[in-house]
Image (cartoon, rainbow, N blue to C red):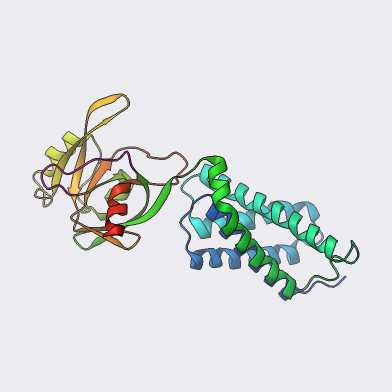
Amino acid sequence: MYIYIDLVFVINLVMDTALIWAAGIFLKEDIRFRRILLGGILGALLYVVSLVCLYSHTLLQIPSAIGSMAVSVITAYRPHSFLHLFKLMLAVCVSAFVSAGGFLAVMFMRYNGRGVFEHFSVYTLFIFAAAIFIAVKLTKRFVFAAVRDNRSYHNVKLYLNGKTAEVRALADTGNSLRDISGGNEVIICERRTAEKIMPENIALDGDGVELFRRLSDTELCTRIRLIPFKSLGNENGMLLGIRCDMAEADGIKIPNAVMAVYDGTLDNGGLFRAIINYDTLDGRKQA
């Protein structure tokens, strides 16, 4: 039997890209087509290499295929934890299973069960990929409603003294924190995000009050705030706030936004590393 490596590469490239994109849509990931395409290219390339090198070792092809899928997903979405990676790979597998079932059903009915694979072509491949795109666009609302996940995520950039930190944020109507002294918008960020734009000689370990005292004698003394908050189990909490030059959420500019430093993990699954007030985005979009 002849195997055309170039055809195998194209088929895997198109399908890997489509399935990785579909999984990201359903899990509300940060969709960046360049990274998704790069993930598809790497996945297809690794599959071709494993097919050539492990053609006579069927059992080794299974972990090799899983490995190539993991590389594709990591390249496309940069998961923050093993659980996040597992969810993404599971979503890709489910998307592949549903898509393959739909493809076989359509081809079986079209050719009355005869010569299904003999009629497969690159032309059919691209039609199938387009069908996946349309199906995902039409069904994603029903999927979100079924799993009751109406959360909205946004790409946020924070600017401070020439440094930039980029983070994925959850838009939450429950986040009503405000900068008391200036009335500026407050964006809650995990410590690891805040440290990306801090001076190298400043560490952010400790509670809010302790950090405020420590930073009072630094170059950031005119930017620091104490942000009071209430949460379950903490009625009188304090977060350290640092006034940034500007924040940007999906292209929406928020001048003088205050970055509130949270010394912990906001989401165990790694879906977001910051929280922004939903009304802030909604109001600025309408304006």
Residue 102 picture quarter: bottom right
Magenta stretch: dominant secondary structure: loop
Residue 274, relative to residue 210: is it above or below? Answer: below
Residue, x 18% and y 55% (percent of image)? 256
Whether residue 144 is visible here, answered yes or no, is yes
- In this view, which residue lies farthest toward the front? 286
Residue, x 79% and y 59% (percent of image)? 104
Q: Which region shows up in magenta?
A: 173-184
Q: How many marks?
A: 0
Query: Residue 185 appears at what percent x and percent y?
Result: 22, 49
Tell whether position 180 is magenta: yes
Query: Residue 18 appears at what percent x and percent y?
Result: 61, 63
Query: Residue 287 appears at what percent x and percent y?
Result: 26, 60
Between 274 and 252, which is closer to the camera in this rendering?
252
**For this view, does 108 lie left or right of residue 176?**
right
Between 182 and 60, which is closer to the camera in this rendering?
182
Query: Residue 112 appears at what percent x and percent y?
Result: 89, 63
Residue 176, relative to residue 102: is it above or below? Answer: above
Quadrant including the N terminus: bottom right
Tell whether position 116 is magenta: no
Residue 129, relative to residue 276: is it above or below? Answer: below
